[in-house]
Amino acid sequence: MIVGEQKPFDEVWEMVKGHKQLTVFGCNTCVAVCHQGGNKEAEILASLLKMRATQEGVDIEIVDGGIERQCEHPFFESAQEVLKESEAVLSLACGIGVQFMAQKYKTTPIYPALNTTFLGDVQEDGYFTEKCQACGDCVLGVTGGVCPVTRCCKRLFNGPCGGSTNGKCEISKDIDCAWQLVVDRLEALGKIKDYEKITPVKDWSKDRAGGPRSFKLEGF
Amino acid sequence: MEIKTDSKLEKILKSGQMAVTSECGPPRSSDPAGIIEKGEMIKDHVDSINITDNQTSVTRLCSLAACVHLKLKGLDPVLQMVVRDRNRIALQSDILGAASFGINNMLCLSGDHQSFGDHPSSQNVFDIDSMQLIQTATYMRDEGKFLGGDKIKVPPNMFVGAAANPFADPFHIRVPRLAKKIAAGAEFIQTQCVYNLDKFEEWMKGVCDRGLDEKVFILPGITPMRSVGMAKYLSKAVPGMDVPDDLVKRLSGVPKDKQADEGITIAVEAMQRLKEVKGVSGFHVMAIEWEEKVPEIVERAGLYPRPEVD
């Protein structure tokens, strides 16, 4: 899923304080799982902004709302009215949702309340970790199910660098060495001999390097 | 053995003699005087001189330009190239540029992560990895082509080296990783600083058991300790560095003003022991910002005078 983190409150306030009306709008799927951008978080953020407005004597009408997903047209039906009447929207969606709304409501400013941080999993309640960079050419089949593009700080494809120490990365003791994980996993799978196969240079044209990507299904 | 390039390092190694390389870091300045001075200081005592490539991710005068300065003085530079800062277009371009000045050695490295350096908010590149850079350089030389497939009219002629760290984890993958670098085309290896001689010898045994010493020239890295403080710092703060407690104790037992001398003696003793180890083809003496001690170390290790080659 997509993980995001709320921007510092002061940064959010600076973006929106000049408006007379603002809709704080949640996205109740991915970013709700990480408790940053769901409809409940939208309600809380709206309250905080109202308090700040009162404290600073700023006249701004703030309402809150939300839908299940800000990245697909059908979900917007229930919120058409409130969004059309909004002077500005503070979206708690990921960067995809913010852009989708900006494209949909051509003259309404849509502000991001979140920094979209990564594609990750839920290791445990409240703990999310990055697992995929959507490079467009998955290598997990040869790396034992551990992604070197995402999890190696140097994106190495052919083994651990000289900084791997006690299973940790040279840049931080809090980061696992991806290649230690790959090696452990290849051993568990009885495939450690495969380590010596050289992975050739990668085709990054399938990554963001090739420009914005799209995918169209025939017959839809 | 077939000599492929005009590299002095290649000629000495392939003649069966022990090679000695050293390493100089370029200045954080546009003035090349410092690097030329360092080169002149050690040139009679080493065969080739590595020039580091923005080591520890701190911005410096570029490795290629520094190599050109040494080459113009008649020295044999080793162009260090990290894959952190340049994509395959820039790396291949710099290989051509180096070859155009008659630079015939390169060392392929990943590079320290930029979070250690002076621009921690910079983007990193890592378009290819160090293994793939070895492949790239040998492919350009042997096939006369760019990675993209186009022909190179006059291919660059490089003696291609790589690094190895026998002390990093996981240890049991370190010999296979060397094998992989050799398969990618590495012809010489300069290792991480060796302080734990027992562990280095254990790694070398694994290397020789697989016959890898027949396929590549291995130059263990030697860095003299200047003080007990340096030894403690290296053992605690530098990932992938193995400094045994005995060595720290030995330095601690010496008065402060004698610790540097003791550090030199320890380095010389290490070289004397490792000279006898099967598969060791020379030494890479990295006296960090202490280049003036390189001649003494080489002489005391019994590796002076250096051989002459055509």
Image: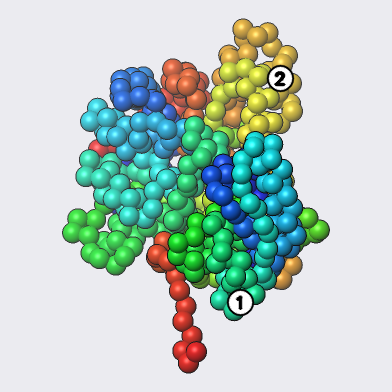
B45 sits left or right of B143 in the view = right
Look at the image and tell me in which quarter the C terminus of chain B lies. top left
- Using the image, tell me which numbered label, if any, was put on residue A77: 1
Q: Does dot 1 land on a helix, a strand or a loop? A: helix
Which residue is located at x 29 percent, y 34 percent? B65
In the depicted view, which residue is nearer to us: B200 or B140?
B140
Which residue is located at x 41 percent, y 37 percent? B53
Q: Is residue B93 above or below residue B280?
A: below
Q: Residue furthest bottom?
A: A219
Residue A101 in view in this figure: yes
Q: Which residue is mark 2?
A: B250
A124 sits left or right of B309 in the view = right
Q: Residue furthest right?
A: A125
Mark 2 falls within which chain? B
Q: Is residue B179 above or below residue A10?
A: below
In the depicted view, which residue is nearer to us: B24 or B261?
B24
Tag 1: residue type? Glu
Tag 2: residue type? Arg
Same chain, marks 2 and 1?
Answer: no
B57 sits left or right of B199 in the view = left
Q: CA distance from mark 2 to mark 1?
A: 76 Å
